[in-house]
Image: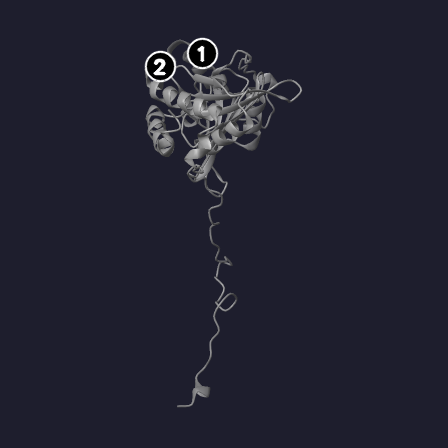
């Protein structure tokens, strides 16, 4: 057989005929960052033998998680005076979870959820940006997130002060103000799905201008991310959901004390109590 007589055909980009409509084949982007659970670094049991601060912190955390179901109030422990070695051990055991929170004040604070849902580590800073307090908290959400004493803006709707290119934002503001007033009476949360409404960029910019940017920002990272931002209007939050490629897939305004997506569920807190027991099992002789 003479192989030289067999015609050769190349394959790959540029070898296929172009589509009649001029379109080219394209692929969707691959997912980017994704938060995954990381088991806290396991320490040698002897590590805790001389660290009274770390042992006391873990004992407090066990009791706080075990008793949290009996009370909805936050459980707080002040770790500001913890010695450096004990602090390092506590940091390694708690690790970092998927939710982080910043508060521009007052008070100025930065919070990181641990790998145990509902267990929060909050650093408070003074006016000179120096660390003032280091708190460990057991709660569905840090207690300061529900503080709205400094938010007093009202939603004011006026056609006279509305730019000409803003067409659909005013009815949303009217509805928000109605929900906000009703929420103060019946505490029933409301959600306005902006993704389903015909809103131009000018409408969204006008909504942002009227509602303002409040002191609290929450970021939840998982398969994609969720950004929760307080507005300057009490109990009104802007919630944006992004997929793993960073594309906005859901844009909502919520009337509630704190959006549920930012809160640890009761079953999550119960699970955290069990997981903490598993983490501390090798150290039972030391943490007792």
Query: Residue reaching furthest top?
Result: 185
Query: Residue reaching furthest bottom?
Result: 1
Instruction: Answer left or right for 159 relative to 225.
Output: right
Q: Name the residue under label 1.
A: 181
User: The C terminus appears in which quarter of the rendering?
Assistant: top left
Q: What colour scheme was applied to this rendering of the protein? A: one colour
Q: Which of 269 and 60 is in front in this view?
A: 60
Q: Which percent across, then down, holds residue 250?
A: 45, 33
Q: Which percent across, then down, holds residue 238?
A: 49, 25
Element type at mark 1: helix
Instruction: Answer left or right for 209 relative to 282.
Output: right
Q: Is residue 227 visible?
A: no
Q: What is the number of the mark on residue 93?
A: none
Q: Image point 60% across, 17% down: which residue?
A: 160
Element type at mark 2: loop
Q: Which percent across, then down, holds residue 226?
A: 47, 33
Q: Which of 244 and 136 is in front in this view?
A: 136
Instruction: Decide: few, some or many residues near mark 2? Use Cα within 10 Å; few <14, some 14-19, many ≥20.
Output: few
Instruction: Decide: few, some or many residues near mark 1? Use Cα within 10 Å; few <14, some 14-19, many ≥20.
Output: few
Residue mark closest to the camera, 1 vs 2? 2
Q: Which comes before the other along the chain, label 1 or label 2?
A: 2
User: The N terminus appears in which quarter of the rendering?
Assistant: bottom left
Q: What is the number of the mark on residue 71?
A: 2
Label 1 to label 2: alpha-carbon separation: 28 Å
Marks 2 and 1: in contact by CB < 8 Å?
A: no
């Amino acid at each position: 057989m003479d192989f030289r007589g067999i015609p050769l055909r190349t394959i790959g980009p540029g070898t296929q005929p172009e589509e009649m409509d001029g379109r080219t084949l394209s692929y969707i982007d691959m997912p980017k960052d994704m938060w995954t659970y990381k088991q806290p670094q396991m320490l040698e049991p002897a590590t805790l033998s001389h660290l009274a601060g770390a042992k006391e912190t873990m004992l407090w955390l066990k009791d706080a998680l075990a008793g949290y179901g009996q009370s909805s109030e936050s459980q707080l422990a002040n770790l500001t005076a913890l010695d450096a070695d004990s602090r390092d051990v506590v940091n390694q055991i708690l690790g970092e979870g998927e939710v982080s929170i910043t508060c521009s004040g007052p008070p100025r604070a930065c919070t990181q959820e641990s790998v145990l849902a509902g267990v929060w580590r909050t650093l408070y800073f003074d006016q000179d940006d120096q660390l003032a307090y280091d708190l460990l908290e057991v709660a569905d959400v840090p207690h300061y997130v529900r503080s709205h004493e400094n938010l007093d803006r009202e939603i004011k709707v006026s056609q006279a002060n509305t730019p000409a290119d803003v067409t659909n934002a005013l009815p949303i503001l009217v509805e928000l103000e109605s929900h906000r007033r009703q929420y103060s009476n019946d505490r029933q949360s409301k959600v306005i799905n902006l993704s389903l409404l015909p809103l131009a960029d000018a409408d969204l910019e006008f909504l942002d201008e009227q509602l303002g940017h409040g002191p609290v920002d929450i970021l939840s990272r998982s398969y994609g991310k969720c950004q929760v931002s307080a507005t300057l209007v009490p109990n009104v939050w802007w919630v944006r959901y992004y997929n793993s490629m960073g594309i906005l897939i859901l844009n909502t305004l919520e009337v509630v004390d704190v959006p549920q997506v930012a809160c640890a569920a009761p079953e999550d807190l119960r699970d955290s109590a069990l997981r903490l027991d598993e983490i501390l099992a090798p150290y039972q002789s030391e943490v007792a």
